[in-house]
Image: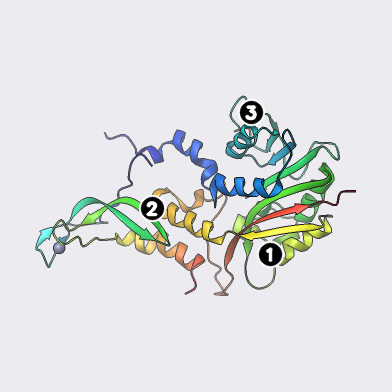
């Protein structure tokens, strides 16, 4: 019997798991360049998954800590198991928070963002990368308390998200669009991935909305900065 | 990617009618949504005609295009 192809083996998929994300680590790096954290800055990676970004942060010389509700972070990396909606830290603990492909999956986004702001020091920065809806009104489940069924369902409209960031206390928001990376990842999944549902932490279902409305998903990077005092 | 993914015809044996030869599983580079992918697809060894299996075209490809492309 022939052995399964490498990209199909559980071990490889575990390793590659975190890079099955629009833009991969190079988008993370791009965001870090904008943030320009000082060396040794205390950073929290919310929803660190298999630890790809966390590893990058440590390599870059930051005092980084990963958080995920599952215990699948590789041994040896600084890691806390917790839910992103109840973060077990004191106010002002971090210089920066990284949150990639996670917010869209969470209920109570207003509360989550307010908690991020509370955990950051004055002048602290939030690096957020996620799906958003490009057109029309924000999707209903924006500030719902129910857990979204998929990250597409849970993705906010761009305007709605930026209003939530402002309400949370962030006063400068730098947005860049990376929808091309979303398309590139989708194309890669068609040819190299096993299931489309492996997009974004296996929670997603690519399901065009049934009512034929023309909403289009986009992918964005937001750097949000708290006031200095 | 260490190994190129292979896509076989959904059923049956396929021939290129212009060249009258059977299609072979060959490595090709697919350009799709602005990216290039090395994959193995049924292809005519003479003229290079390449077949996209129906299950792939009507399955994952159609799903992604419906979501991301303006159509
Ligand atoms: Zn031919």
Q: Nearer the viewer, residue B67 or B48?
A: B48
Separation of marks 1 and 3 at Cα, in angstroms: 33 Å
Side of A31 where A116 appears, left or right: right
Disc 3 crowd rating (10 Å Cα; few below 14, some 14-19, many 20+) is some
Report the disc number at residue A191. Answer: 2
Q: Is residue A211 left or right of residue A12?
A: right
User: Any atom of ligand 1 within 8 Å of the CB at mark 2?
Assistant: no
Q: Chain of mark 2?
A: A
Mark 3 lies on a secondary structure that is loop
For the question of whether residue B8 can be seen, the reply is: no
- Residue on which the image places disc 1: A158
Identify the coloring.
rainbow
Front residue (pair A17, B56): A17
| Total numbered labels placed on residues in the image | 3
Q: Position of residue A5 (x, y in %)?
A: 35, 39
- Say which residue appears at 31% left-offset and 50% top-offset: B39
- Say if A123 sits above or below A184 in the image: above
Q: Position of residue A97 (x, y in %)?
A: 73, 44
- Asked whether, in this view, residue A93 is left or right of residue A50, the answer is right
The quadrant of the picture showing ligand 1 is bottom left
Is A78 situated above or below A156? Answer: above
Name the secondary structure under disc 2. Answer: helix
Same chain under badges 1 and 2? The reply is yes
Residue B33 spot, x, y in % from top left? 42, 62
Residue pictured at 80% horizontal, 36% vertical = A88
Residue under label 3: A77
- Viewer-closest of B66 and B43: B43
Answer few, some or many: residues within 10 Å of disc 1's Cα (few below 14, many 20 plus, some between 14 and 19). many
Q: CA distance from mark 3 to mark 2?
A: 32 Å
Chain to which the residue tagged by mark 3 belongs: A
């Amino acid at each position: 019997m022939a052995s399964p192809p490498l990209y199909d083996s559980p071990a490889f998929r575990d390793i590659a798991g975190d890079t099955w994300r629009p833009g991969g680590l190079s988008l993370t790096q791009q965001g870090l360049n904008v943030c320009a954290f000082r060396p040794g800055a205390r950073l929290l990676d919310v929803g660190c998954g298999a630890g790809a970004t966390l590893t990058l942060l440590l390599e870059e010389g930051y005092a980084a800590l990963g958080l995920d509700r599952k215990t699948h972070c590789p041994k040896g990396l600084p890691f806390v198991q917790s839910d992103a909606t109840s973060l077990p830290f004191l106010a002002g603990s971090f210089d920066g928070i990284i949150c990639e492909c996670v917010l869209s999956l969470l209920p109570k986004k207003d509360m989550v963002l307010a908690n991020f702001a509370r955990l950051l020091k004055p002048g602290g920065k939030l690096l957020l990368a996620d799906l958003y809806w490009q057109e029309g009104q924000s999707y209903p489940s924006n500030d719902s308390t129910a857990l979204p069924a998929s990250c597409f369902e849970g993705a906010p409209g761009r305007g709605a998200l930026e209003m939530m960031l402002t309400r949370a206390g962030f006063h400068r928001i730098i947005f860049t669009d990376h929808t091309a990376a979303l398309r590139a990842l989708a194309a890669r999944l068609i040819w190299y991935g096993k299931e489309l549902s492996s997009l974004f932490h296996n929670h997603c279902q690519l399901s065009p909305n049934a009512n034929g409305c023309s909403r289009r998903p986009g992918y964005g990077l937001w750097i949000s900065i708290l006031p200095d005092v | 990617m260490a190994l190129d993914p292979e896509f076989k015809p959904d059923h049956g044996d396929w021939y290129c009618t212009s060249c009258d030869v059977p299609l072979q599983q060959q490595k090709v580079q697919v350009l799709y949504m602005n990216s290039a992918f090395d994959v193995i697809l049924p292809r005519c060894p003479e003229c290079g005609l390449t077949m996209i299996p129906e299950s792939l075209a009507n399955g994952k490809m159609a799903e992604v295009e419906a979501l991301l492309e303006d159509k």
